[in-house]
Amino acid sequence: MLAFTAKRLGIALLVALTVSLITFSMIYVSGDPAIAIAGEGARAQDIEAIRKFYGFDRPILEQYFSWLGGALQGDFGRSFTLRQPVADVIAARLPVTITLGALAIAFALVLAIPLGVLAAVRPNSIADRFALTVAVVGQAMPTFWFALTLILWLGVYWRLLPITGSDSWLNFIMPAIALGYYVTPAIMRLTRAGVLEVLSSDYIRTARAKGLRPMTVLFKHALRNAIIPVVSLAAVQFGFMLGGSIVIETIFQINGLGYLAWESIQRKDLPTMQAIVLSLSVIYVLLTLVADLLNAFLDPRLRVT
Amino acid sequence: MSERVLTVEAMQVDLPLAAGTLHAVQGVSFHVDRGETLCIVGESGCGKTLTALAVMDLLPSAARRTAARLELNGQDLAGLGERAIADIRGNRMAMIFQEPMTSLNPAYTIGNQLEEALLRHRPVSRKQARERALYLLDRVGIPSAAGRLKQYPHQLSGGLRQRVMIAMALMCGPSLILADEPTTALDVTIQAQILHLLAELQREFAMGLVLITHDLGIVARIATRVAVMYAGQVVEMGTAQAIFSAPSHPYTRGLLDCIPVPGKTRRGEKLGTIPGMVPSLIGLMHGCRFAGRCPYVVEACRQSEVPLAPGQAPDHLVRCIRHAELGGLAAHAARAVAS
Amino acid sequence: MVETGLVRAGIPTAAEILAPSPAAVLRRRALRHWGLLIGGTILAIIIVMALLAPIISPFDPYDQQLGRKLIPPIWHASAKATWVHPLGTDHLGRDYLTRLLYGAQISLLIGVSAMLISGVIGTTIGVLAGYFGGRVDMVVNFIVTTRLSMPVVLVALAVVSIIGSSLTVVIWVLGLLIWDRFAVVMRSATQQVRVREFITAAQAVGCSTPRILLTEVAPNVVNHLIVVATLEMAHAILLEAALSFLGLGVQPPTPSWGLMISEAKGLMFFDPWLITIPGVALFLLVLSINMLGDGLRDVTAPENRN
């Protein structure tokens, strides 16, 4: 088990390093980051000031290593436009995004897993077709449009929920639904396929032959095996949601990392953007690692490798 | 001191398909007493597995089962609902399957799955269940049983897993065990051990054993009585002794002919075969199902349904209208006629 | 039963000779799959309407008529609604039906282009990884894992904000980012083909690798490719809509559906149809492409359903 974890950790570190390299080079995509930050029509001295502030005049390798070194210590430097340490701003906004992501994945799981199980237990029934419809609709609907429609109906016409802000947990309901609905189809399909496959396996026949009750057979035996790939998928989807929350956060004006990214883009605050992308990527790498470990924990057969 | 454990009379299993209804099991009747082993023999697709599944009510949901009588220890099974049957399954009758490698849940320990079988049907404590599991694991010949309880199925070999399956079947002390080709997936040496074990356990626990197989060698070793199945029907049934010494149905004869006999079969002699293929079981059928391949077929064979009737002895049943006239022919001569 | 003897001799029976060819079987299955038919039909309709946009609608999508702004669509019980503008007009007086049709052109163009670019990238590395295995596979896996670790929307936004956004930039940025599923699926498909005997046979005969890839591997993985291509096209369309919605995709006044929704955001409480119409259009387009892709998958390889 230890060797397994070590190997995965090693790969994760390598990936994180590569991501940091890519993220770092991102701001050089236009040639001169100082010009990109300063914007069009900026004066030469402003551009020079920016260049000095961020150290763009230093050799590239030196820049990269000092940036990476700082990042490893949790220091992303200061933002020219924000006048604050970038790390502080990110640390303040990250929990909000994580909360939103967690609620969204919770919503998706609560909707998708029961539907998937029901669809698998009664294939080609009305329940199955309903589940399929939910999946098909979820995959085709643009998240931002769904969010706006939710606002229109739940927020304005029926006045059930608040529309903007992040004060109370009520504010998170609509965003969580809008965000979570997009990943529901994948989870539902995987659950359905997994349960369907598991239900026809020999050990389920053994369980029935032992006289176990149908609920026991379904939950203790079938679901326990079918859910394994779903767990890792959920961990991975959680990562997607952290990255994809920018649209939802801007619509609902929730002060999370996605909204910060949005603001940074408006202000052409590239270093903050950089830091956000790196942070999210590292979190994502960690999540994949956790997903792998969860997989091994849930399936005794995998613990050998 | 025979006590009837299982009575099956006129059991039918139908599977609705797109092409029509598949009559997988047609009018099958047999019985098993305490302490006796009934072997159901036949080739793949003859319906023997479905027969066992039908007794246990483990058929696929699309299948339809009917039976004039289906009794376990005198209690009717056919009319029972799903809940009542679940109370009996794994409790008073148990089944062992063919593939030990996949018959255990990989996510739970051996101990968990064994104890579960007992806890479901008896109001015992977890500790008591574990003790019973330990006892049975030891009894089926698994070394260091205590350690095995904590192991996962993938950590055991095929032979060991099958022993675990046997132990699991015995957890509640059933009066009937149905074993569907329990040794087919195992090495030959392990096969012998498992068979020996089954015979021993049956004696010790005074159970009825129905063993399904396509291997006549196994039948010879362990059967008290034999039922030969072909195309969904029982074509011959009697004591093992009678079936081997005086096979009365042409199909049984053909099966026995396929086996080379040391001392009798000459070098270079061609092994017997049964030409042709099993007929389709879909839709309406009439006449003898074996007619297409039988070396003794006459027109009358195809005309009407052939009943299972007493043959050379009252307890030796045959489904052949010509069995009386064919009774005298030696198997050897029969081959000469066919070729 | 009469056929038994002939079958055992290896001679094809009458039934076998008259059996339909694989292509015919596919075509029959396709025509019976209602998801594929409906999806394909809707998509075809959208494509035709997009191509015939100048003929269907007399208006110019860029033509602002401030005197005729915010006319509601024809189904509204309002005096202002008129058949001249069946879907109404937006806040700048532009005919909504026209903008919708030209927006379809944009969505389809971006969908196909991004799909082609990402398809070329992903398929190449996926097939190479699947065919050669070993080191090549390890490297490709690493690249794919790295790409998967990066938040696509954010990276796209960052890059676009630095370079400046335009139709071409959006197409290229998307194309260079969404190739991961192509790589994963094609790798897996190639691996499955790789172990088949006819590959070994081709190698034994001395076929060069490029030839094997082209003549033996390609025909057997192309059905997977088509399925992924349709799904990624839908993906690209949704991504572009999101980017344009955030203002970093196609720039105004170009009629992108995502942009139209964004422009109408502020007015949605009073004129909700301004966001409903493009939203439904996006939904139908993506839905039809997805149904087509799912249908193709079911028809060509039913065992891959999930």
Image (tube, rainbow, N blue to C red):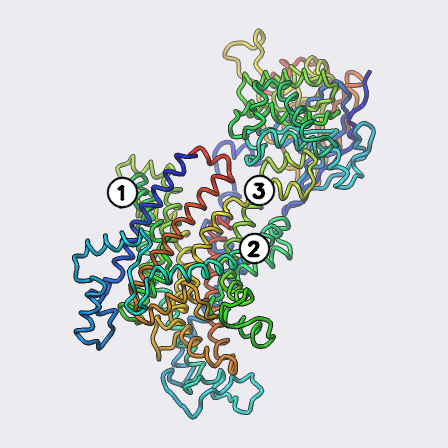
* Same subunit: marks 1 and 2: no
Question: C291 or A214: which is nearer to us?
Answer: A214
Question: Mark 2 or mark 3: which comes first in sequence?
Answer: 2
Instruction: Kindly identify which numbered label has been placed on residue C209.
Output: 1
Other residues around mark 1 within 10 Å, as few (<14) / some (14–19) / many (≥20):
few
Decide: is C140 above or below A78: above
Q: Which residue is mark 3?
A: A224
In the rendered image of this protein, does residue B61 appear above or below residue A106?
A: above
Residue at 44% of width from left, 51% of height from top? A236
Same subunit, labels 3 and 1: the answer reads no
Relative to B74, B103 lies left or right: left
Q: CA distance from mark 2 to mark 3?
A: 16 Å
SS at mark 2 in the image: helix
Image point 60% across, 54% down: which residue?
A115
Badge 1 amino acid: Thr
Describe residue A60's horizontal placement relative to residue B220 as left or right: left
Q: Which mark's residue is nearer the viewer, 3 or 1?
A: 3
